[in-house]
Image: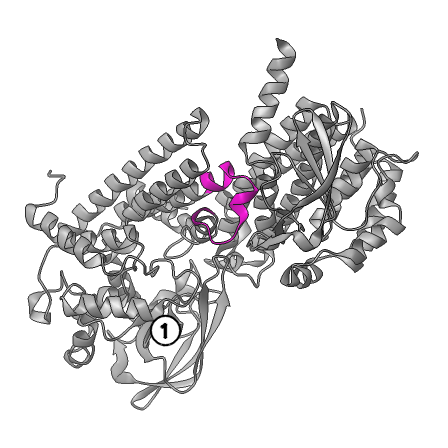
Amino acid sequence: MDFGFTREEESFRDEVLGFLDGYRDLDGYFHRGADTADGVRRVYRALGDRGWLSLSWPVEFGGGGRSPAYEFILWDEMAYARVARPPMGPGLVAKALMSHGTGEQRDRFLADLRRGRTGFCLGYSEPDAGSDLAAVRTKARRDGDEYVVDGAKCWTSNAHWSDHIWLLCRTGAPDSRSRGLSVLIVPLSTPGVTVSPIPTLDGGRLNEVRFDGARVPAANRVGPENEGWQVVGSALAVERHVQFPPKRLRRDLHDLLDDLEAAGVHRDPVVRRRLQDLAVRVAEVEALALALLGEVISGEPAAVPAAYHKLAGTVLAQDIARTGMELGTARALVKGTDTEFLWRQSILETIGGGTSEVLRGLIARQEFGLRA
Amino acid sequence: MDFDPSPTQRALLDALGTLLSRSAGTDRSRELAERGAYDHVLEAVLRRDGFLDLFASEDAGPLEATLAVELIAAELGAVTPVPHLLVLPALGLEQPAGPVVASLDGPAGPVRYGAEATQLLLADGDRCVVAELDPAAAEPVPSAYGYPLARVVPAWHRELAAGTAGTLVNWWRVGASAEAVGMMRRALDLTVAYTKDRTVFRRSLGSFQALQHRLAELSVLVEGARWLVYEAAFNGAPAEASAVAAAHTMTALGRLTRETHQIMGAIGLTTEHDLHLWTLRLQAQRAELGGGQGPRRAAADARWAAAS
């Protein structure tokens, strides 16, 4: 057991902090207010130029071959600085292509992904398939060398500024559940693909992505037909250590302290008691994040530690934001303050990327062996 | 003791419900909120039909006025029912047309419908101050929490008799809590209906026992708040009972908001869905009362000041 980062890892953190000095004004973690997509694209390209989008990729695929700890440090500091979240492309998509893609697909996509030149969004959820992904209905019908795709995805983050969608779709019979799904890479510029906004409470947008007879080359299918469930499952596993960076919470807490100090209430014993509780819980989530990172480094599946971490972290993000709103007077309602924005934003955290209910069920089944 | 609504109360709420189904509701609320506007039409109808006079009327009273405040808020009526139905009559003041606003902790903070308000009620020590407002001088501030807000500028003011601040604050706590009770119930009803309709893992969402228990707990919270509010109104808004009702309600609304959004899932996070029309306004209710701490401290002060 060793709780620390190595000297090399800490020196990489210093490099990251130096890099971030050029981007601290960019609010790409939350995409608040005006469209920040251009800025985030610039950050991804700059990261790609440094080889920081492929830190832990195997050397044979042009990666750095380094420990996942480097990725964790990078995205943790990015979260504290509120600059950007880890992109799906070089993370989940690239790693899935390395294990399930063809040689031709790796040649076609990996270089651009590594360099931050191409953006992916995840097309999993549908109006009637959220937590229950095996109920996906978007249909891909084989027609010669192509698939013809019909259906709709919803709650799709970042689809409006991505180049491709990583699409989970039904290639088997309608009731085939998880045994009849495949993964296709679909360029969002494909005729028959339409992206439209779904406005959310935080002032941002999710998207609906519709497919009306969109024709996709069969060469864009990742993994065998009807084995998409395995592709998606293993893709999920490789990104758990960067999915919810704990320093986002450290920053939330610091901002809350600043707010309460400005309001002159930070010395109030009741307020201090609340802050102490939150500070202890931030430390708890940091510990759970490191435990999860340790599992990922040792190559464990880490689904249960990831569930612990996300459950504790996302509800804490809400509790920090709610503390600000609960202690605030009418001034806290004025739009644009950190407090009121984080209240609206953090509601999403316990739902997106795996709801708390699904994670609790996973812990009960995998950790305790309980069944319904 | 009788906890059933009386025939008068039933008739009153039926009539008000009919009126609100025509003059309030989600569509009208969205349209007015888009413009940041107060609903002068609804206020005029409520005035015409006598709902602003319930508090002091012979066949009704403060409890009936409180029930009406609850229903107006549940139906998202874009008016200021707490001052019009409760606070102004409790203080024996005339009812001006247009929004009336109050500040329980000094004049600095933004207030609901402040850009159109002509009168401000201010608690200042144990005195109550009534200030006329110049809407042209008001400074609108943006808010995502349902109600249009503005900072107001008092023009001239007059003081009411000593001891009136308590009447203002206590009835304000009862009224704001009644509004919150109405809105919490709607948010919960919407969520329960969703769990019956939604199918997940080949079952109805509401068939999962873990969710059933959470929904049941929320109903306990809302019912507790409801009876505390009614009891405080029935007894004429005594300081401790009003503070306790507000303390419980303002705590309950935090949990209710979290749970209804969580159970509703992604659809509830969108502005297209109606859930946020109630949940965002609920946060504003609490902030207007000075946050969750204010009523709790007042309850403790009332209890221990009385005991010492």
Residue at 29%, 72% in the rendered image: A119
Question: How many residues crowd mark 1 within 10 Å: few (<14), some (14–19), many (20+)?
Answer: some
Q: Secondary structure at mark 1?
A: helix
Name the residue carrying label 1: A161
Residue at 34%, 44% in the rendered image: A313
Residue at 64%, 34% in the rendered image: B104
Q: Is residue A170 visible?
A: yes
What quarter of the picture does the N terminus of chain B occupy?
top right
Residue at 41%, 46% in the rendered image: A372
Q: Residue furthest right?
A: B58
Residue A332 belongs to magenta span: yes
Residue A55 image offset from top left, x and y in percent: 14, 61
**Callout 1: chain:** A
Q: Say if B251 sits above or below A240 in the image.
A: above
Of the residues shown, which amino acid type is indicated by label 1? Trp
When asked about the image quadrant of residue A23, the answer is: bottom left
Q: Report the front residue among B274 and B242.
A: B242
Q: Say if B130 sits above or below B17 in the image.
A: above
